[in-house]
Image (cartoon, helix red, strand yellow):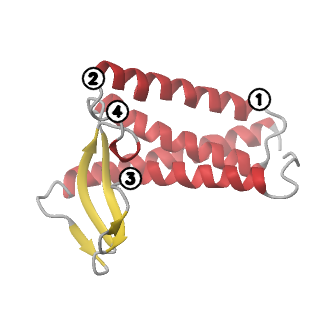
Amino acid sequence: MSAFRKAAVILLILCLCVGCDQVTKSLAREHLALPQPIHLLGDVFRFQYTENTGAFLGLGASLPPAVRFWSFVVSVALLLIGTLVFMWTSEEINRLGILGGSLVVGGGLGNLIDRLLHSGAVVDFMNMGVGRLRTGVFNVADVAIMVGVGLLLLGVLRPGHKESI
């Protein structure tokens, strides 16, 4: 894959991830700030607005604000920049690596934008489950990150993963 094509794919995925994430979070702020969640398919899908000042599943939410800023804003920003630089400069990365890495960075950027614009909080609004077995509340950026990590693992674990683009 040419450098131009690689850059175009990365940029397109980043724009789609961040755009979809920010639009859905804006809709959640506007329409889901209700006292009662919205239940779909017998409560398999639940839409409920929440703001998460922590990381995954609220981990670190009770840390002092300065520690949360350095952990969830500065270090995440540096990690995202490092991932972008690696994807751009690596000649060994395959298509799954570019797709997965771009999804991880796009999701990370979506949540980073929230933290910068909303006093360190990320808007979460989706929840899935059956009965008492439920996921945590998450957003589109979280889905992009999880799918991206899955693709990266698939790219590393599958036979012939060394082939380049």
Task: Find numbered disc 2 in the image and state the secondary structure of the residue it sits on.
Answer: loop
Front position in the image: 153 or 16: 153
Asked where in the image residue 123 lies, by quadrant, the reply is: top left
78 over 41 or under it: above or below? above
The amino acid at mark 1 is Thr
Local crowd at mark 3 within 10 Å, few (<14), some, or many (≥20)?
A: many
Q: Name the residue under label 3.
A: 139
Local crowd at mark 1 within 10 Å, few (<14), some, or many (≥20)?
A: few
Residue 105 locus on image (x, y percent): 56, 39
Q: Pick whichever of labels 3 and 2 is earlier in the sequence.
A: 2
Q: Mark 4 points at which residue?
A: 115
Residue mark closest to the camera, 2 vs 4: 2
108 over 151 or under it: above or below? above
Label 3 with label 2: CB-CB less than 8 Å: no
Q: Pick whichever of labels 3 and 1 is earlier in the sequence.
A: 1
Q: Name the residue under label 2.
A: 64
Residue mark closest to the camera, 3 vs 2: 2
Q: Distance between the residues labelled 1 and 4?
A: 28 Å
Q: Distance between the residues labelled 3 and 1?
A: 30 Å
The amino acid at mark 2 is Pro
Asked where in the image residue 52 lies, by quadrant, the reply is: top left
Local crowd at mark 2 within 10 Å, few (<14), some, or many (≥20)?
A: few
